[in-house]
Image (tube, rainbow, N blue to C red):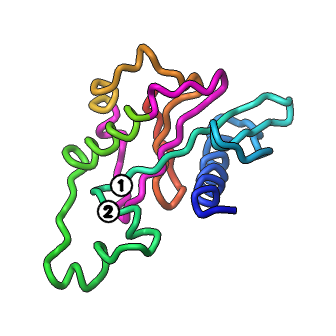
């Protein structure tokens, strides 16, 4: 499996655990694909397609998480190179940009967009959901199963639409 596919697979596993718990469903991964990324089915043979993408507090956090950058390392912190992020400003704007980039994609019915947010901070996205919605044109939302944010530790999901 490629690193990208690994990230998509483990993101989908975490999302399905939370989604199934919230809605009393039984979805499981049945196939890794390209578009959408993950195909799931429940015990009643209902299909759920997942398109997976990542977001970050600031540009460069994803490569840092993957060990390709030291921008979030102790040395960067000690040298004053780390810039603070704020949920209601820069973090929210990056999230909006990531979602907008996916809104023109159409994967058919029963599809959800899952945005895994790479951050060491457990942001409460409920505080900015209305702001995110207002910044998106959701009248043309191709994700009939919702647009979701999942935290990096895979312990919470937040429904945007």
In the image, 29 versus 26, the foreground residue is: 29
Q: x%, y% of residue 135?
A: 28, 27
Q: Is residue 103 magenta?
A: yes
Q: Is residue 26 left or right of residue 34?
A: right
Query: Residue 156 versus residue 2: which sits nearer the camera?
Result: 2
How many numbered callouts? 2
Return the x and y of residue 39 as percentages of the image width and height: 72, 39
Q: Where does the image place residue 101, in percent across and percent down from the top left?
A: 40, 35
Say if the magenta span includes residue 83.
Answer: no
Neighbourhood count class around disc 1 (C-alpha, 10 Å): few under 14, some 14–19, many 20 upward: many
Residue found at the far right of this picture: 44
Extreme residue toward the left, this view: 80
Region of the chain picked out in magenta, as a range: 102-129
Q: Residue at x 70, y 62 (%)?
A: 1
Label 2: state its secondary structure. Answer: loop
Task: Report the Cα–Cα distance between label 1 and label 2.
Answer: 8 Å
- Whether residue 147 sits left or right of residue 51 in the image: it is left
In which quadrant of the rendered view does residue 131 lie?
Answer: top left
Regarding mark 1 in the picture, which secondary structure is present there?
strand
Name the residue at 31% across, 29% down.
130
Image: 62 above or below 108: below
- Say which residue label 2 marks: 60
**Residue bearing mark 1:** 56
- Whole-percent x and y of residue 41? 79, 36
Residue 16's place in the image compared with 101, above or below, is below
Q: Nearer the viewer, mark 1 or mark 2?
A: 2
Tags 1 and 2 in contact by the CB under 8 Å rule?
A: yes
Q: Residues within 10 Å of mark 2 (few under 14, many from 20)?
A: some
Q: Residue at x 49, y 38 (%)?
A: 148
Label disc, if present, on residue 130 of the rendered structure: none
Q: In the shown orientation, is residue 88 left or right of residue 149?
A: left
Q: Residue at x 33, y 25 (%)?
A: 136
């Amino acid at each position: 499996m490629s690193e990208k596919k690994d990230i998509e697979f483990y993101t989908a596993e975490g999302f399905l655990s939370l989604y199934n718990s919230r809605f009393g469903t039984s979805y499981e991964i049945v196939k890794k694909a390209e578009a959408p990324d993950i195909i799931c089915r429940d015990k009643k043979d209902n299909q759920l397609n997942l398109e997976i993408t990542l977001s970050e507090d600031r540009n460069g956090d994803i490569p840092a998480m993957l060990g390709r950058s030291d921008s979030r390392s102790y040395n960067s912190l000690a040298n004053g190179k780390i810039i603070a992020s704020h949920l209601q400003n820069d973090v929210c704007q990056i999230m909006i940009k990531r979602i907008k980039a996916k809104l023109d994609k159409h994967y058919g019915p029963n599809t959800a967009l899952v945005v895994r947010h790479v951050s060491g901070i457990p942001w409460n996205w409920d505080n900015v959901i209305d702001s995110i919605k207002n910044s998106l044109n959701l009248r043309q939302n191709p994700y009939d199963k919702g647009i979701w944010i999942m935290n990096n530790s895979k312990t919470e999901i937040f429904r945007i639409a």
